[in-house]
Amino acid sequence: MNRSVKIAILIFAGLLAWFVIRSVIRGDISTQHEEPRIEKNTVAPQAVTYEASAQTHGIRLKAKGLTAPDKSVTVKAGTAGNVISTPVREGTHVSRGTLLCGLDVEARAARLEEAEARRDAARIDFEAAKTLAEKGLAPANNEAAAKAALDAAEASVNAARVELSKTQIRAPFDGIFETRLAEAGDYLSPGQPCGTMVDMDPVIVAVEVAEANAGQLSTDMTGTARLPSGQTYPARLRYVSRTANEGTRTFLIEAELDTGEDPVAAGVTAELFIPMGDVPATLISPGLLTLSDAGDLGVRYVDDQSIVRFAEVKVIDETPEGAWVTGLPSPARLISIGQDYLAEGVEVRPVPQGGAQP
């Protein structure tokens, strides 16, 4: 190869190298692989909403309990004896003093007659001693001894009468003879039962309430009670315990029901409702209630910037129309469909309920 050819090759290589370096500097030739750009979907998800506003709503204490009689007692024998009569049928309404169980009276009647005879004799002795003492024919202490004997005889008569009266076991108050616990022919010792009586006028509802509510209650507060039949009756608090149950930390309250002439049995489940005041609250469907990631009960709604928010709420009442809650802004655009799938902080396209778009 001659000298001129070598010079030409060197010149060409130099020009080629200069061209490549110039192209890299100017960016005409890319030395890196560029990732293709992917357009992100910027369309916000749709949220079906409706507007709800707070209204004045009365807070009610709601508690379940059982109906009970105003009074309930076991009527017991005051003396020993054989039962000879049980004239009242179970479930009968009786007046105070009605005979419930009769015991054998023969022995006690005989003892009363004997006591009365001794009293009559003692009276005669006393009158004679008194006359003799007045005439000075007998010492005065004879009269005093005769008077003491007469007094003792009178006391024996009274004791015999009381003992005889105990053979008649009678109703202690107006009410219902609920259960007969003795039959004719039974032998009753003192303290053994003849039967049970209850007074269902008025009917009582006894319930346990939380300590947070007990302090807001007082006697004579009024409300209503609802029975399983759906029947409701006016109710008035007559007792509010100020001592908590050690096991449950709840407080016992009792309410009297005005049942009129309606027969209401004891032991029936009853719901007691006592108004506690008015507060602003929002009526919602219970289906809108959900839980946050932290486990708090609340409702998701859309704010003015179309952002999903979570409001912690408190259910203060449940009615056939829905749940009354506090804690929501008013008014609020509540998410009625798909709120469980929309996270807090997500931007959405609010669509009024009934006008949702596919």
Image: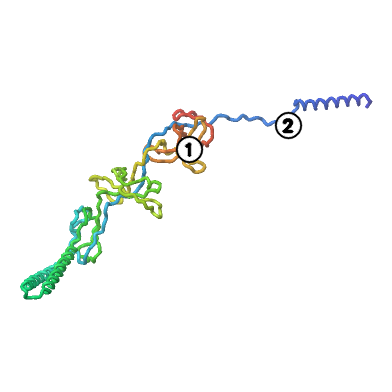
Cα gap from disc 1 to disc 2, whole angstroms: 51 Å
Mark 2: give few (<14), some (14-19) or many (20+) Cα within 10 Å. few
**Residue 354 in sight in this render:** yes
Q: What residue type is labelled 1?
A: Ala
Is disc 1 surrounded by few (<14), some (14 to 19) or many (20+) residues within 10 Å? some
Q: Is residue 106 visible?
A: no
Left or right of 338? Residue 171 is: left
**Which residue is at the far front?**
136
Q: Nearer the viewer, residue 86 or 79?
A: 79
Residue at the farthest left position = 135
Dot 1 or dot 2: first in sequence order is 2
Coordinates of residue 229 in the picture (x, y in percent):
30, 44
**269 with respect to 138 (left or right):** right
Between 202 and 9, which is closer to the camera in this rendering? Answer: 202
Q: Would residue 274 appear left or right of 11 to someone viewing this image?
A: left
Kind of residue indicated by mark 2: Gln
Task: Find numbered disc 1 in the image and state the secondary structure of the residue it sits on.
Answer: strand
Q: Which residue is drawn at 65% across and 30% down?
A: 37
Q: Is residue 299 above or below residue 253?
A: above
The quarter of the picture where the N terminus appears is top right
Residue 188: image quadrant is bottom left
Drawn side of residue 338 relative to residue 180, left or right: right
Compared to residue 354, the image places residue 170 above or below, namely below
Residue at image point 78% right, 26% down? 23
Task: Choose top left, top right, bottom left or bottom right for residue 97.
Answer: bottom left
Q: Mark 1 points at which residue?
A: 311
The label on residue 284 is none
- Colour theme: rainbow
Residue located beneath label 2 in the image: 32
Q: Is mark 2 on a helix, strand or loop?
A: loop
